[in-house]
Image (cartoon, rainbow, N blue to C red):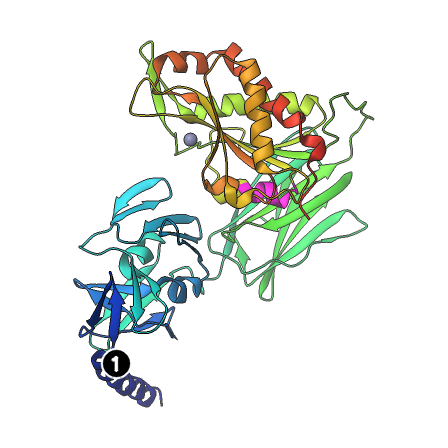
């Protein structure tokens, strides 16, 4: 039965191959051309995918319609007509391409598309143009595996993670401030969803991860904030996660964008009643993100015979901002408070999962010209609505004004850029560049504890000046 079916598919494919190869008229680069190359079918994870335009072979490289193929796999695809740029996000990877260009960026890294082939706009005569991309380059950049089955005329794309039973293998827990414990549960493959958490009268918060197993101990003592211990158990077809809580005021459980981390935040009741400080953030949540970290040092610079790494300066300033905001009644969550590397979407996920009212990422700059200097504050035009009562551009202006009152570093003003962390945050979000590490004079300011304190005061004051307008996203 199976052999017969395979034979039938092969026959149909061969027929398709011959018939369409003779019939395809393509329009691209301002001209019209008869396509006489091979026509392939596409399979994604062993399923045939119907595409609006079949794969087109140029210089031995196959181009495929990006939306039909990669959106079908669950990737996020964006095309900006004005600049002819293509943005693809899949799991942890962020790929940027441009029509007609062999330059590409995988996360922050520049790469050149191999072979004499680039993304193209191609139309079948009389139809709308499709954005076509080199299938092998894009697939492999996103961590997918490509196989050309020339005999059967099939291009196969395989996600080796697809269909794999996810294993819950690691847990991390830390305090972000005096009352909020955050916990991250790590899975080795994506899960589609988790069940809605249930909080029992006995103080147990539990939820299930469908289709998953785990390699953790059945009981792990936590004793952080309101979390006493973590219990996990494998049931028929799912893993149940239970947290034994004490003094729990509120909880939040969310799946990260890459669907491989479960983010949990548990807020406990204060032990003593707190007098609200005058310049109060009223317990609103602000996420402070120290850029880079761990294996990703960011940029670097040298002064006085010593080399400094961006990740360390970012973290030092971020902690000072946290301390000032916390002292003013703001609940501050840090994406990292040590030398670790949360992914870019982990950082905005933390803010989104905790209903933060403001997200601020802290970075340090560099340029090839040693004379470049100054601080600047970025926001993303794709995240500049004022639905929460405050827009990203208002926040950026407030922070720029306030920093300029506190430090002597040159003011380069407010700028826009589609950074992943600002674009994927659901609330007003900014990315602050403290100064240029490539400029030794400026670097000597940036490593000074006094200047860092003043800079952090500028950032915190700029946030406090507008926090009353900011409400949690709905
Ligand atoms: Zn940076």
Query: Residue 162: x percent and y percent?
Result: 43, 63
448 up-or-down from 165: above or below: above
Q: Which residue range is magenta in the image?
A: 348-355
Does the rendering let one see residue 245?
A: no
State the residue position of label 1.
Answer: 20
Q: Quadrant of the N terminus?
A: bottom left
Asked if disc 1 is less than 8 Å from ligand 1, the answer is no
Q: Residue at x 76, y 40 (%)?
A: 248
Left or right: where 204 falls relative to 26: right
Left or right: where 81 falls relative to 429: left
Query: Residue 54: x percent and y percent?
Result: 30, 72
What is the quadrant of residue 427 in the picture? top right
What kind of secondary structure does the magenta stretch mostly adopt?
helix
**Ligand 1 appears in which quadrant?**
top left
Left or right: where 350 falls relative to 126: right
Does the rendering let one see residue 99?
A: yes
Q: Is residue 63 magenta?
A: no
Q: Nearer the viewer, residue 42 or 181?
A: 42
Q: Residue at x 39, y 50 (%)?
A: 82
Query: Residue 94: x percent and y percent?
Result: 40, 48
Q: Residue at x 66, y 55 (%)?
A: 207
Element type at mark 1? helix
Q: Nearer the viewer, residue 211 or 141?
A: 141
Q: How many marks?
A: 1
222 up-or-down from 309: above or below: below
164 up-or-down from 249: above or below: below
What is the quadrant of residue 356 in the picture? top right
Q: Residue at x 25, y 55 (%)?
A: 118
Disc 1 residue crowd, few under 14, some 14–19, many 20+, Cα 10 Å? some
152 up-or-down from 220: above or below: below
Query: Residue 190: x percent and y percent?
Result: 49, 56
């Amino acid at each position: 039965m199976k052999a017969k079916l395979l034979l039938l598919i092969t026959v149909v494919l061969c027929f398709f191959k011959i018939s369409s190869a003779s019939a395809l008229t393509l329009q691209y680069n301002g001209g019209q051309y008869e396509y006489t190359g091979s026509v392939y079918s596409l399979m994604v994870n062993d399923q045939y995918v119907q595409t609006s335009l079949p794969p087109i072979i140029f210089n031995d490289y196959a181009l495929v319609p990006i939306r039909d193929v990669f959106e079908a796999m669950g990737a996020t695809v964006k095309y900006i007509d004005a600049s002819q740029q293509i943005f693809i996000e899949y799991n942890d990877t962020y790929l940027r391409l441009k029509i007609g260009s062999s330059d590409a960026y995988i996360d922050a890294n520049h790469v050149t598309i191999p072979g004499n082939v680039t993304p193209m706009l191609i139309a079948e005569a009389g139809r709308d143009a499709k954005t076509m991309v080199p299938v092998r380059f894009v697939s492999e950049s996103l961590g997918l595996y490509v196989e050309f089955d020339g005999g059967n005329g099939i291009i196969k794309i395989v996600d080796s993670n697809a269909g794999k039973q996810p294993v819950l293998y690691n847990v991390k827990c830390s305090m972000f401030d005096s009352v909020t414990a955050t916990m991250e549960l790590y899975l080795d493959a994506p899960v589609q969803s988790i069940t809605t958490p249930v909080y029992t009268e006995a103080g147990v918060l539990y939820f299930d991860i469908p289709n998953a197993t785990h390699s953790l101990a059945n009981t792990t003592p936590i004793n952080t904030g309101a979390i006493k211990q973590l219990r996990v158990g494998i049931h028929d077809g799912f893993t149940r996660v239970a947290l034994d809580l004490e003094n729990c005021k509120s909880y939040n459980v969310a799946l990260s964008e890459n669907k491989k981390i479960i983010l949990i935040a548990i807020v406990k009741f204060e032990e003593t009643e707190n007098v609200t400080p005058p310049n109060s953030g009223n317990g609103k949540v602000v996420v402070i993100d120290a850029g880079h970290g761990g294996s990703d040092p960011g940029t670097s610079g040298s002064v006085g015979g010593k080399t400094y790494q961006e990740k360390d300066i970012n973290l030092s300033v971020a902690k000072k901002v946290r301390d000032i905001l916390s002292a003013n009644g703001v609940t501050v969550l840090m994406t990292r408070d040590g030398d670790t590397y949360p992914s870019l979407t982990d950082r905005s996920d933390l803010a989104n999962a905790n209903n933060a009212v403001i997200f601020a990422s802290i970075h340090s700059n560099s340029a090839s010209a040693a004379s470049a200097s100054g601080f600047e504050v970025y926001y993303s035009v794709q995240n500049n609505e004022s639905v929460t009562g405050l827009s990203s551009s208002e926040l950026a202006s407030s922070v720029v004004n306030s920093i300029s009152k506190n430090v002597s570093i040159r003011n380069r003003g407010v700028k826009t850029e589609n950074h992943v962390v600002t674009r994927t945050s659901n609330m007003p979000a900014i990315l602050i560049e403290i100064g240029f590490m490539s400029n030794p004079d400026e670097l000597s300011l940036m490593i000074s504890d006094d200047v860092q304190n003043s800079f952090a005061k500028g950032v915190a004051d700029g946030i406090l000046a507008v926090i009353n307008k900011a409400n949690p996203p709905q």
